Image: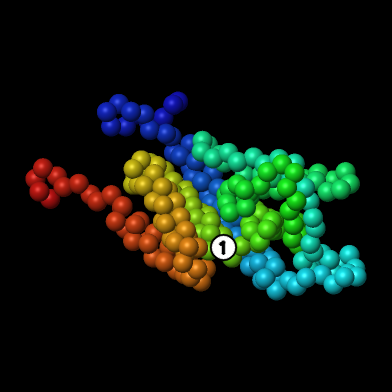
Amino acid sequence: MGGEPGKGGVRRQSPGRTRAVGVLLILVSLISAVLCYIAFAWWLPSDRDRYRDYVAAELCPARATAQVQKDCLSTWHFTVVKTVIKSGGKSSTYTATLKDGNSWTGVVDFGDPGPLLERLETGDRVTATVWRRDIVVLSKDGVRQSTSEAPRDEIQMNAAMGMLAAFFAAQTFAFGAVRLVSPRDHAPFTWEPYGRRLFFGSIVICFGVGLPAVWTGIPWWTVPAVGLLAVVCAAVLMYPRPERTAAGT
């Protein structure tokens, strides 16, 4: 009932159970394929257009309507209530709590402590640049620092995440299809060792290509182009080779 005995007395899964796992893997691959489509068809273009709009935004006119203020850069003045700079551990926190002359109080997040956040003290007056209702820049005495809400030209990582979803979809689909076609013998399309190597290798390749692309500013489309070639080469090199028999065959 639990399966058929295999080599060394280890029980193998029954063909029906193996096919069920194959169907599950194919369903997972479809979900990952949808995530890949969303990354390239919506997420990446959305972030690219948002960054372009931000770069092209101008200062709001003196008497701007609500719609104009949404798309232009407005300037506000706030008082620092407190700052939190916490580095290390599992997570880092860099925030500044601000308040205006009325009752509004808000928290602004940063990606790092410098160059402005680490200098701020309680009671300091700061100038905030607001775009589309988000504080995107904080400044004081000529020192400026972008907040976490400021759009950035880092769509190479969007492409890297979409590429990772595509590789995972391809791997799970292939492993699932093999289980449906050959439920009794689907080696080497198993988690150990080929599947594990492919999975973690894809992660290393995607981040290994995406991060340098962000740092150097090369076009985003080079990420899937280089990543695809690297993953194909890795899949070929990692593919288990048949062991030679003692007779040398």
Q: Is residue 68 left or right of residue 231?
A: right
Residue 45, visible in the rendered structure: no
Give the tally of numbered discs: 1
Q: Nearer the viewer, residue 170 or 213?
A: 213
Element class at badge 1: loop
Residue 50 % position (x, y): 69, 66
Residue 105 figure quarter:
top right
The answer to whether residue 72 is above or below residue 106 is below
Horizontal arrangement in the rendering, residue 153 relative to residue 218 (left or right): right
Q: Amino acid at mark 1?
A: Glu
**Nearer-the-camera pick, 200 or 7:** 200
Please state the horizontal and vertical placement of residue 188, each as a whole percent of the image: 33, 47
Please name the residue that numbered disc 1 is placed on: 154
The spot of residue 170 in percent (x, y) is 47, 56
Q: Residue at x 60, y 47 (%)?
A: 118
Out of 54 and 170, give the one closest to the viewer. 54
Q: Nearer the viewer, residue 218 or 107?
A: 107
Q: Quadrant of residue 205?
A: bottom left
Quadrant occupied by the N terminus: top left
Q: Residue at x 57, y 41 (%)?
A: 92
Please report the residue visible at 42 percent of the width from the left and 34 percent of the height from the top.
13
Residues packed near mark 1 inside 10 Å, few (<14), some (14 to 19) or many (20 plus): many
Q: Do we see residue 85 in this rendering?
A: yes
The coloring applied to the image is: rainbow
Q: Residue at x 51, y 46 (%)?
A: 25
Q: Say whether residue 14 is left or right of residue 115.
A: left
Residue 54 rendering spot, x and y as whole percentages: 70, 68
